[in-house]
Image (tube, rainbow, N blue to C red):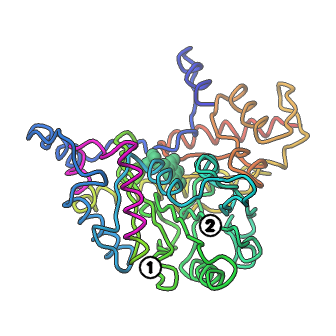
Amino acid sequence: MSARARDLKAQGVDVVAFGQGEPDFDTPQKIKQAAIDALNAGQTKYMPTLGDPETLAVISAKFTSENKIPNCTPKHVAISSGGRHSLFVVLQCLIDCPTAGQPQDEVLLPVPAWVSYGPIAELAGAKVVEVPTTAATDFKVTPAQLKAAITPRTKVLILNSPSNPCGTMYSEAELRALADVVADAAKSVAPNMIILTDEMYEKLVYGGIPHFSIGSIPSVAERTITVNGLSKTFAMTGWRVGYTGTSGEFGLKFIKAMSDLQGQLTTNITSFVYPAIRVALTQCGPEVEEMRQAFARRAELIYSLSKQIPGMPAPRPTGAFYLFPDVSSFFGKRTKKGTTINSGVDFAEALLAEACVVVVPGDDFGGCGANHIRFSFACSEDNIRKGLGRIAEFVDGMK
Ligand code: PLP
């Protein structure tokens, strides 16, 4: 969709884009300056594989004070080349290679979910077991569903809060209930089960639900791996910085495994980026808050405008920067130009062709995602007004 939108834009067409999951802000200047200064000071050589001691210390202090993860020292932390790379290395270390005649490790994935979890888990050799969620629970897995999905082969549960693509998030009580299920399962049916929690959007919350890290709960702390990164919070998608935090004895062993693997893959991230990470995590509270407030205003705007369009229900976004409406009420209808809509993909394609608006069809997110489209509102309020106006007209013309 993005490529088609680019082509149309190149032809001079006025396209409104809600596709890209990327903040439209620039990286704060003091973060850039820290990298420039390090580069000028000659910090251009190899560094330790998982990061320099100073930056690992800053990240472990962040995990300890903000996320309340117990026993998380610099030796419990790894820095990788973006959140996706962190997840890749983590899952490669967790999943056993499939062997003929042996059952495959299973990864439980509540869906709809971000598109890369499934492929990354499969590349590591896992069987991905989708756990379908619905709008009735704001697309959150319930303790009963989780309990029913756990088998002796369950190795990992992936959680993502706030969620891409759903724009919703778990409360502390909900995460505690899920942690209880995992702690119980670990005593019997799934002794090696790990929670992999992706908290990339932890700072972009605005629905009144405070972000909570499941890795802070003592009963599961030593079986929880927390992945985060700078891409979304600090508008640093191009810098490629992801980081992983663990706890206790398990964490020490696990980070050693990550070091062994990453040492043969990418080794350290770009060396002059380390001081920029430290500045981002310790000095950029006001900049992050400014961006968060902008996202909060956009969330309210897009949610209120979408509610005025009949037949497009969506949960109120409470975190990240996505709105995830159900468009199945339009299936079986025809657009003004005569296209029949039978899926989210049809809806998104017709919307681009007939109204020049780009959204992401939800089928790649799994489960009921096929009935949905995803808006990224990492764009201006004018863009939101213009795009939603066009969509209102587009659906109004349907029969
Ligand atoms: N996790 C989630 C939920 C995401 O939405 C994304 C990016 O879209 C990532 C991880 C990957 O982030 P990065 O750009 O740091 O690789």
Q: Is mark 2 within 8 Å of ligand 1?
A: no
Mark toward the start of the polypeptide (2 vs 1):
2
Q: Is residue 224 above or below residue 119?
A: below
Q: Is residue 106 above or below residue 274?
A: below
**Left or right of 386 in this view: 267:** left
Which amino acid is tagged 2?
Lys
| Relative depth, front residue between 300 and 277 | 277
Q: Position of residue 163 (x, y in %)?
A: 57, 59
Question: Residue under circle 1?
Answer: 216
Quarter of the image holding residue 181? bottom right
Q: Residue at x 63, y 30 (%)?
A: 1
Residue furthest top as drawn = 11
- Magenta-drawn stretch contains 265: yes
| Relative depth, front residue between 80 and 379 | 80
Mark 1 element type: helix
Q: Residue at x 72, y 59 (%)?
A: 102
Q: Residues within 10 Å of mark 1 (few under 14, many from 20)?
A: many
Question: Residue under circle 2?
Answer: 155
> Which quarter of the rendering shows the C terminus?
top right
Q: Position of residue 271 (x, y in %)?
A: 23, 44
Q: Residues within 10 Å of mark 2 (few under 14, many from 20)?
A: many
Q: Position of residue 253 (x, y in %)?
A: 40, 68
Quarter of the image holding residue 164? bottom right
In this orientation, does residue 298 appear? no
| Relative depth, front residue between 252 and 26 | 252
**Left or right of 129 in this view: 252:** left
Question: Spatial distance from mark 2 to mark 1, Cα to Cα?
Answer: 20 Å
Q: Which residues, given as a range, are shown in magenta?
A: 252-279
